[in-house]
Image (tube, rainbow, N blue to C red):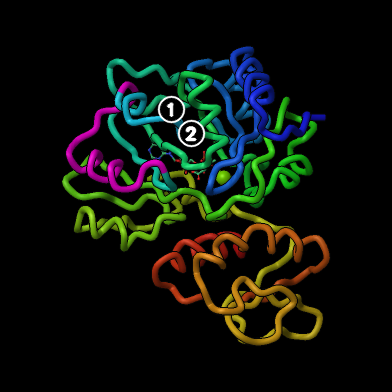
Amino acid sequence: MAALLSPSDDAIMRAVETLRAGGLVAIPTETVYGLAANAQDGKAVARLYAAKGRPSFNPLIAHVPNLDAAQTEGLFNAQALALADAFWPGPLTLVVDVATSGSVSDLARAGLNSIALRMPKHPVAHRLLTAFGGPLVAPSANPSGHISPTTAQHVLADMGDRIDLILDGGACTTGLESTIIDARGDRPALLRPGSLDPTKIERIWPGLIRPDLNPDAPHSPGQLLRHYAPDAKLRLNASAPRPGEAYLGFGAGDATLNLSPRGDLAEAAANLFSMLRVLDAAHDIIAIAPIPNHGLGEAINDRISRAAK
Ligand code: TXA
Ligand code: MG
């Protein structure tokens, strides 16, 4: 079983040593818990894919502690710099061209000549990245296709027998994965809706492109249709539960659990994965209240419509 450690300086050093030795360490970020491996070590990355049961053609996000480290790995045009300046550290992943000085293994990039980079805001992730001194790949710390973990206990339950260490940084604050933007063209392209509200991106660099979310030709494999999957069946846009169903509410009214009684989309995003887990453990059908499709509601509806497939 993986050791579950609170993030003391000693625990951070133990995590660094584990990563240098090719091991796997689950880490808190502000979005979801990530399963980190040394991005430069192809063998460690192969272990990571095996632990997740993830298809190896799926490229990973490289996490870095600062913009200098990001620019060692990728080429930042004016648009990428403006977005990094506005939203890093934070829940934004930027896809840029690989730099010739890049150190991330081909396997982690799935052989592409682009790279996905993110500078997380969570203090524990930041301390670890700084102490480690190199990029860490970190997909969500769940078996491929399962619900992303937002607490250390979720990680222990799902992956504890396959990884070395878990750093416990408490519950994640935003609760949905980062928003992924392809920043290589003239205009930013939304590859995955996530914790950063796209309307905020449009304020920094207008003209956001929303590629067709066609599951047969995913730009970002996060777009594969069935991706975030509970065992229970989901019924979406349900204004009330039917007999025998659990009801995941939003806004005022009776519910088994409520994503946000006051109808706040950020609060709903933070609660989504953990409430789905709780209901999934005890119910066969989960009816979900309608969620408005603006702002963060787009990312929430993206996740629940995939989970319902
Ligand atoms: O919030 C997050 O982003 C979390 C936390 C742990 O940082 N990480 C995460 O990583 O969600 P992961 O590996 O589960 O998601 C990676 C996504 C995939 O959809 C992948 O296809 C996309 O990033 N991606 C990675 N490299 C890419 C590239 N070069 N071009 C397009 N998409 C890429
Ligand atoms: Mg994931």
Which comes before the other along the chain, label 1 or label 2? 2
Give how far apart the Cα atoms at labels 1 and 2 are.
6 Å
Between residues 262 and 75, which one lies in front from this camera angle?
A: 262
Q: Please check the rendered image and state whether residue 112 is part of the magenta-colored stretch, yes or no.
A: no
Percent across and percent down for residue 228 are: 60, 54
The quadrant where residue 231 appears: bottom right
Bin the neighbour count of mark 1 within 10 Å (Cα to Cα): few under 14, some 14-19, many 20 and up: many
Is residue 29 toward the left or the right of residue 23 in the image?
Answer: left
Q: Which residues are magenta?
A: 72-89
Name the element at disc 1. Answer: helix
Q: Nearer the viewer, residue 110 or 75?
A: 75
Determine whether 196 is above or below 221 in the image: below
x, y percentage for residue 262? 56, 79
Some atom of ligand 1 lies within 8 Å of the CB belonging to the residue at label 1: yes
The picture places residue 159, in percent across and down from the top left corner, at 74, 37
What mark, if any, has residue 60 been given in the picture? 2
Q: Residue at x 53, y 49 (%)?
A: 31
